[in-house]
Amino acid sequence: MQVFRGISIAPGTIKTIFRAFKYPNYRVFYYGQSVSLIGTWVQNIAMGWLIYRLTGSGLLLGTVAFAQQIPSLFIMPFAGVLADRFNRLKVIIISQAAAMIVAFILAFFVLTDTVTIPIILVLAAVNGIILAFDTPFRNSFVPDMITKKEDLSNAIALNSSLFNLARFIGPPIGGLLIVAVGEGWCFFINGVSFLAVIISLFAMKVKVKIRERRKASLLYELKEGVFYAFKEKSLRYLLLLVGVSSLFGLPFQPLLPVFAADVLKGEAEMLGLLTGALGFGALVGAFFLAANKNISSIPVITFRTALLFGAGLCIFALSKSIALSFIMIAATGFGMIVHFNSTNSIIQNISDEDKRGRVVALYSLSFMGITPLGSLLAGWVSEFIGVPYTVFAFSLFCIVSALIFGKKLPVVFYKLARKTKKNS
């Protein structure tokens, strides 16, 4: 198919990228999420700008991110155990409804001009608790909608494309809305957007899998899942790579308002465009991964994009040029999303079915539970050496961890090949 002069898409590529759409439940899920996630990114951009407008502090940006993400460190492992026990669809509906209520409460405080940093911290923590329960259920729910194992990595990649399409569209809209009507209405719009995903979840017809009733305690099953994940060398290497990338790489995101305002001398629109460029790179990366049908190539892709993530962030941190910053943040987004989602794909493919929820929870914990520690650390270090040099120093750890993982690729290749052969 001809797109532009000299640029074409091979026949069947579009069908390959969207092959998970042949599952009706997945389509409904995708469409509902598409509306809700745009609202989420409108809120994210408004939250960052609100905090920086009220305080002008990089430390408080990191602290609020810490408050939202730290519940994952304690709750998510147990939520992973529950995801192997309970009806995943029902729990996701409850968690989405709870997140909607939090958005409306936040909108109320901002619109009535009664918002304070302690209120923001409390609501961020509540949102973090909801997210800590929701994430393992939502991630392990994807295979419940996909009946063929070979389409699982495509569904995961499309989920990522949706998230990053929202990241691309939502922040610029959020930046414009902040200027036009203020942060409060951004939070209200996000609350309304949750209705789309809740309605789509009620419309789904998922066959509930009958799970064996377990007599073991939550703590025992948690220990069983952790032991299983770290006994398997391939899972251990993947989780450690994600953990280091999360601790030192992902904390750059809550610090983006500093780059927009102080480094690039912009306003809220600059923050929205910068976040949109990150989302654009991530969106391209998600479609790149979705188009890949050769699962045996994913470990190499994971290594290369982990390296790209660190290198792109390294250059972005020191850039004072708007053009170079946009290019590097897009490259960072591409590397980040392909790195994390290809890792997720490998983990879901090589994990045993009865332990999938717990392993996915450990994966989610590796970036959602560890990232707040990195955010807090980055906020503290930035008080001494500044935000750009903090992000630069942290990016070097990401590069080193990617190089170490590259030496462990044969172990991951071997495990993936064995599991693929067993499932075929």
Image: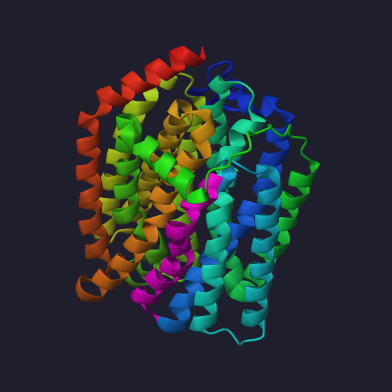
Tell me where residue 127 appears, x and y as whole percent.
56, 65
Nearer to us in this view, 274 or 19: 19
Q: Is residue 50 left or right of residue 253?
A: right
Nearer to us in this view, 398 or 277: 398
Tell me where residue 329 appears, x and y as whole percent.
37, 51
- The answer to whether residue 248 is magenta is no
Nearer to us in this view, 357 or 269: 357
Looking at the image, is 347 positioned above or below residue 91?
above
Looking at the image, is 391 positioned above or below residue 230?
below
Identify the image quadrant of the N terminus: top right
- The part of the chain drawn in magenta is 56-81
- All told, the count of numbered labels is 0
Which quadrant of the view contains residue 385? bottom left
Looking at the image, is 269 positioned above or below residue 136?
below
What scheme was used to colour the molecule? rainbow
Residue at position x 64%, y 69% in the image: 102
Q: Magenta segment, principal secondary structure?
A: helix
Tell me where residue 258 appears, x and y as whole percent.
36, 69
Tell me if I can see residue 85 in this picture. Answer: yes
Which quadrant of the view contains residue 325? bottom left
